[in-house]
Amino acid sequence: MSQPSVLAALTSALRSGAIEVVDLTAPLSSSTPVLQLPAQFGQTAVFELEEISRYDDRGPAWYWNNFRSGEHTGTHFDAPNHWITGQGLADVASVPAQQLIAPAAVLDFSVEAAANPDFLLEPEHIKAWEAQHGPLPDGGWLLLRTGWDERSHAQQEFLNADENGPHTPGLSAECARWVAEEAPVIGLGVETVGTDAGLAPGFDPAFPCHSFLMGSGKYGLTQLQNLAALPPTGAVVLAGPLPIVTGSGAPARVLALVERA
């Protein structure tokens, strides 16, 4: 008797629960927190629905909507052309489909971020994690868990800003450079509003995760949720951004496959 195919084994494991599907996506609505830049810059749009018809005289048997949204609203995918350092590199529609399914390393620094909202991940943190769990996955994602998804219900708490600007965890400039230029991963995923820390406008360079990762042709995933449900290694991430031609990014449904005993 022939052995079952890999895909047949996968679908069987999904049906049985041996592989769990974890949704890493924040629900997208008008209350979804959005990034706020200084007033002199252009601002992203909040998500809006415009009803076309709802089983009425505008369309008696169907319900549908138009929607308006920024590319970088809610859980979303950053393409390399999002930043000036990636100018001329891939737009979100050009990301190879094969790279939208990739293994993930989950680095949990939620305790540190709870104690200090300005916590910064350093290369030494990653190397210590690798000493315990093994190397970062080649062609995979580095996902930084900080517990920040617990704040996603409210704009003010999520951005955590005061007169000195936002205070959210992230990567130091040196760590961003290391992830972009030396780590084997294809991108960085975070729970915060963007891939950079709240203090990143004052770093050198400013917004180093965007500057280094986009310039290296790597990707970003932001406003992820439920990273606490993933193991440090072994999960597989499926990231599905809208393939907007020339787009710098797009809202995405991001899922993780986790093998359960």
Image (cartoon, grey):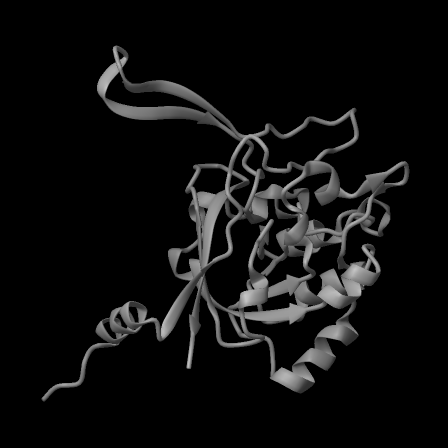
**Residue name at image x 47 percent, y 46 percent:** 252
Q: Is residue 131 visible?
A: yes
The extreme left residue here reads: 1
What is the x, y in percent for residue 105?
Answer: 57, 71
Please determine whether, in this image, residue 48 is positioned above or below residue 208: above
Q: Residue furthest right?
A: 163
Compared across the picture, whether 133 is left or right of 128 comes to left
Examine the rendering and report whether any part of residue 141 can be seen. Answer: no
Corner quadrant of residue 133: bottom right
Left or right of 124, for residue 75: left
Where residue 107 appears, x then y in whole percent?
65, 70
Residue placed most toward the observer, 11 or 3? 11
In the image, 198 versus 155, the foreground residue is 155
From the top left corner, tell me how far across and down residue 83 is, in percent. Answer: 65, 43
Q: Residue at x 43, y 37 (%)?
A: 245
Left or right of 95, for residue 44: right
Residue projecting furthest to the bottom: 1
Quick check: 69 above or below 187?
above
| Number of numbered discs on residues | 0
Q: Is residue 253 above or below residue 65?
A: below
Report the residue at 17% width, 85% height from top.
3
Q: Quadrant of residue 11?
A: bottom left
Image quarter in which the C terminus is found? bottom left
Which residue is found at the position 52% from the left and 30% from the top? 69
Q: Position of residue 179 (x, y in %)?
A: 67, 65
Name the quadrant of the N terminus: bottom left
